[in-house]
Image (spheres, helix red, strand yellow):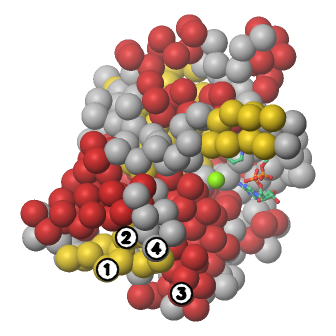
Amino acid sequence: MKKILVIPGDGIGLEVVPAAVEVIEALGLKIEFIDANAGDGVKKKTGDALPIEVLEMVEDSDAILFGAAGESAADVILPLRREIDSFVNVRPAKAYPGVNALQPNTDLVILRENSEGVYTGIESRVSEEMATLTRVITKTASSRLAEYACEYVKDQGLDKFTIAHKDNVMRITDGLFRKTVESVASGNGVKTESAIMDALAMLMVMYPEKYQVIVCPNLAGDVLSDLAAGLVGGLGLLPSSNIGPNCALFEPVHGTAPDIAGKGVANPIATILSTCMMLEYIGYGEEAARVRLISEQTLSEGKTTPDLGGKENTRGVAAEIISKL
Ligand code: NAI
Ligand code: MG
């Protein structure tokens, strides 16, 4: 029996996570879902966005399924990623047939460093007029990311990845990042292509088909993956995983979408595809492939939520996928 800790969070997290859980339940697998929560709603009730009891439940879990947290997102997702010692955030962006994507040739994956960079929280208010932030890059974190990237490209039958960085300006930090990643890749027989991150943003918009796997520092990965979402039809489609040595957390890339929360129309596909990544991780690869195929079929038939131009609601999309399963 695999134990999945389910944390829907706030806003549309409370809508898309139950829809995705319903889809998995329809497969009848040996999975036990353990309900918990965190985020703004929990903070209002308990004073703490991520109660210690929830954090303690992580140790007993094989994986975590998370929705999104609102204003307290950084107090929820960053400690959860830290708790599982996540060193990579995997964010695939693919344009699906039938979806009106800006760039229909997009099929790429962003492998984002997940523990340091500018997301260390080491900020200080020096004076009324000045604030600073410390950017941390370590050889250890860069190596772990690069090792994962090498395995990842080999699994995909590829032999190369792109390194996004800005070592022409951040010479010491991104210099260390780039050199470390290049050296691990070369030790593993994997080729790399170096790309300055701002220029890469433009090239991804113009020629997304040139990129398959992009390896980047934390903030660059955050920004470039939302950009990639824009190429394929929006945030309602982007799943992600946060991998650690003994546990992993799966979540849609999107946030709580306050503009549509409570209306029942959020696109559940990003979360359903995140659960596919989760199924693969816990050893249900065939089932993951089936759910993915059926989700793609549902998209191509236009049975989608309004963000993709369809008339379905969240539950309707999940019900359609379940009926096809
Ligand atoms: P957002 O991702 O929530 O929304 C951006 C836009 O995309 C909105 O127009 C929204 O309606 C649309 N959108 C997102 N997901 C969608 C879906 N599944 N179906 C249809 N449309 C969808 O980002 P935003 O507005 O910047 O942030 C809102 C809140 O979410 C903030 O409080 C932020 O802190 C939080 N957030 C939390 C994250 C997390 O918990 N991992 C990640 C990003 C934001
Ligand atoms: Mg983001």
The mark lying in front, picked from 1 and 4, is 4
Q: Read off the residue under disc 2.
A: 163
Q: Which mark is residue 193?
A: 1
Question: Residue flagged by tag 2: what amino acid is it?
Answer: Ile
User: Residue 180, how many percent across, how many down?
Assistant: 25, 58
> Which three-letter amino acid code belongs to the residue tagged 3?
Leu
Q: How many marks?
A: 4
Determine the CA span between mark 4 and mark 2: 14 Å
Question: Do callouts 1 and 3 mark residues in contact (Cβ within 8 Å)?
Answer: no
**Ligand 2 near label 2 (Cβ, under 8 Å)?**
no
Decide: is 251 above or below 323. Answer: above
Element type where label 1 sits in the image: strand
Q: Is the residue under label 2 in contact with that under label 1 (CB below 8 Å)?
A: yes
Image coordinates of residue 140 in percent, x first then y, are 27, 43
Could you tell which of marks 1 and 4 lies nearer the N-terminus? 4
Q: Is residue 123 visible?
A: yes
Label 3 neighbour load within 10 Å: few <14, some 14-19, many 20+? some
Counting residues from the start of the chain, the first of labels 3 and 4 encountered is 4
- Decide: few, some or many residues near mark 1? Use Cα within 10 Å; few <14, some 14-19, many ≥20: few
Q: Is residue 50 above or below residue 26?
A: above
Please name whichever residue, 7 or 34, is drawn nearer the observer in this view of the structure.
7
Residue 203 figure quarter: bottom right
**What residue would you read off at disc 3?**
203
Task: Give left or right: position of 93 versus 87.
Answer: right
Residue at x-position 58% and y-position 20% = 35
Between marks 3 and 4 in the image, the one whose residue lies nearer the viewer = 4
Q: Which percent across, then down, holds residue 303?
A: 69, 68
Q: CA distance from mark 1 to mark 4?
A: 15 Å
- In this rendering, is residue 142 above or below 83? below
